[in-house]
């Protein structure tokens, strides 16, 4: 019995982008491109004939902007949306609005050299479309593969960070959270429920550079805790959430009795930068049993090994359950690897953090 193909509509006012994205997706045997449209109005006309499984869309377009298009789609028939957006500050700000409105993931494109960039980034687009097709849209709130490197590539070079060097004789606690597809909304759901005095939190959310600072700013305006994009040397303090900057890895380190974050460049780990595994494994080494690790919605396995190392080091570890995940990928692998102490729905994770910090 033939497996149904993922039906996709591409929406972009650039003929070059439409052509390249259409050709990239059409090469895949499990994907069918229904149409490539120059604007949302044309796309909606096509969608009245056949509704797609996934929409790949730009944001800044004529006749109807992408945000209005997204809101209309989500109101009429919630559908996975992958945003293909500019890497400018203005584009990043608008794309954050799209994520808040229900978009699942971001593919960035430069102002110049778009055709070559999109051809080179074809694997990223295909991966994003496949992940989106598996998304549980009931959990979305309306507001050629690269070689996989292990986290050792980042951790091995750290002085004094060997397996036996963890300093666990401290009462300071830290919470580490990792998430990917669907994570922007999941993080908002968790962090907005935490009081101002909650245990310090470090977060890796898979997101391109330029976007994480705006994401942190948005959360900072919604949360009682201070939320900001992490800078190298920032202290992890009660009442503070540090989000790893896009395009950089974030590691936990110790200075005396204090926790600090180290923000470093490096290779992509598990095809991601920042990588959840890099953060979690550094937390296992540095904080040991004085940590709570949480892995939430996302495609793939990034973070599963690191969470298991945290579990083995004595940390409490939590995975979001399948019923509340947009994509039950990363938590599923973590559970299968035996590195999870508790499996909880999204609406119980904030209380787990509060209880842990008492």
Image: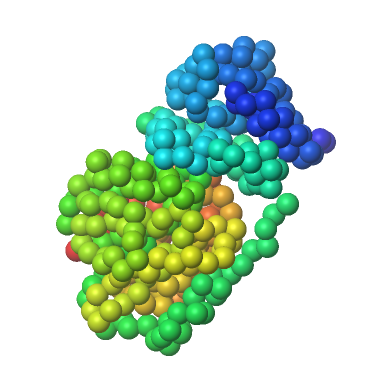
Q: Which residue is painted at 45% across and 25% down in the image?
A: 67
Q: Quadrant of the N terminus?
A: top right
Q: Quick check: 203 above or below 46?
A: below
Instruction: Please give left or right for residue 153 compared with residue 297 in the image.
Output: right
Instruction: Please give left or right for residue 36 compared with residue 163 in the image.
Output: right
Q: Quadrant of the C terminus?
A: bottom left
Relative image position of residue 286 (x, y in whole percent): 36, 77
Q: Quick check: 223 above or below 55?
A: below
Q: Nearer the viewer, residue 138 or 63?
A: 63
Query: Which quadrant of the structure image shows residue 316?
Result: bottom left
Q: Nearer the viewer, residue 267 or 192?
A: 267
Q: Which residue is painted at 40% across and 52% down in the image?
A: 344
Q: Which residue is painted at 24% across and 57% down in the image?
A: 240
Relative image position of residue 345 (x, y in whole percent): 40, 47
Residue 77 visible? The answer is no
Relative image position of residue 213 (x, y in whole percent): 36, 48
Q: Which residue is painted at 60% across and 43% down in the image?
A: 128
Q: Residue furthest front?
A: 112
């Amino acid at each position: 019995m033939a497996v149904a193909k993922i039906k996709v509509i591409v929406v972009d006012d650039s003929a070059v982008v439409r052509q390249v994205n259409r050709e990239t997706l059409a090469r895949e045997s499990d994907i069918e491109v229904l149409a490539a449209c120059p604007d949302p109005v044309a796309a909606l006309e096509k969608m009245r004939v056949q509704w797609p499984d996934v929409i790949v869309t730009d944001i800044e377009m004529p006749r109807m902007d992408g945000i209005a298009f997204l809101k209309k789609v989500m109101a009429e028939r919630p559908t996975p949306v992958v945003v293909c957006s500019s890497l400018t500050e203005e584009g990043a700000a608008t794309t954050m609005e799209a994520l808040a409105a229900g978009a699942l993931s971001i593919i960035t494109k430069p102002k110049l050299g778009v055709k070559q960039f999109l051809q080179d980034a074809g694997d990223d687009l295909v991966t994003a479309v496949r992940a989106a097709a598996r998304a549980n849209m009931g959990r979305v709130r309306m507001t050629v593969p690269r070689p996989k490197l292990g986290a050792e590539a980042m951790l091995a070079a750290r002085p004094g960070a060997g397996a036996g060097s963890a300093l666990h004789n401290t009462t300071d606690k830290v919470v580490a959270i990792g998430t990917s597809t669907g994570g922007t909304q999941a993080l908002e759901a968790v962090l907005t429920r935490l009081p101002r005095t909650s245990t310090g939190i470090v977060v890796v959310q898979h997101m391109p550079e330029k976007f994480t600072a705006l994401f942190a700013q948005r959360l900072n305006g919604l949360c009682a805790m201070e939320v900001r994009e992490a800078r190298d040397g920032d202290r992890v303090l009660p009442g503070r959430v540090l989000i790893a900057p896009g395009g950089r890895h974030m590691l936990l380190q110790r200075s005396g009795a204090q926790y600090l974050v180290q923000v470093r460049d490096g290779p992509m780990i598990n095809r991601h930068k920042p990588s959840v595994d890099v953060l979690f494994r550094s937390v296992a080494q540095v904080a040991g049993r004085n940590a709570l690790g949480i892995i939430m919605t996302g495609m793939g396995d990034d973070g599963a090994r690191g969470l298991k190392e945290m579990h083995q080091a004595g940390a409490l570890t939590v995975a979001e359950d399948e019923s509340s995940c947009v994509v039950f990928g990363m938590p599923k692998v973590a559970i299968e690897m035996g590195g999870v102490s508790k499996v909880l729905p999204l609406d119980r994770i904030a209380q787990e953090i509060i209880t842990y910090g008492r």
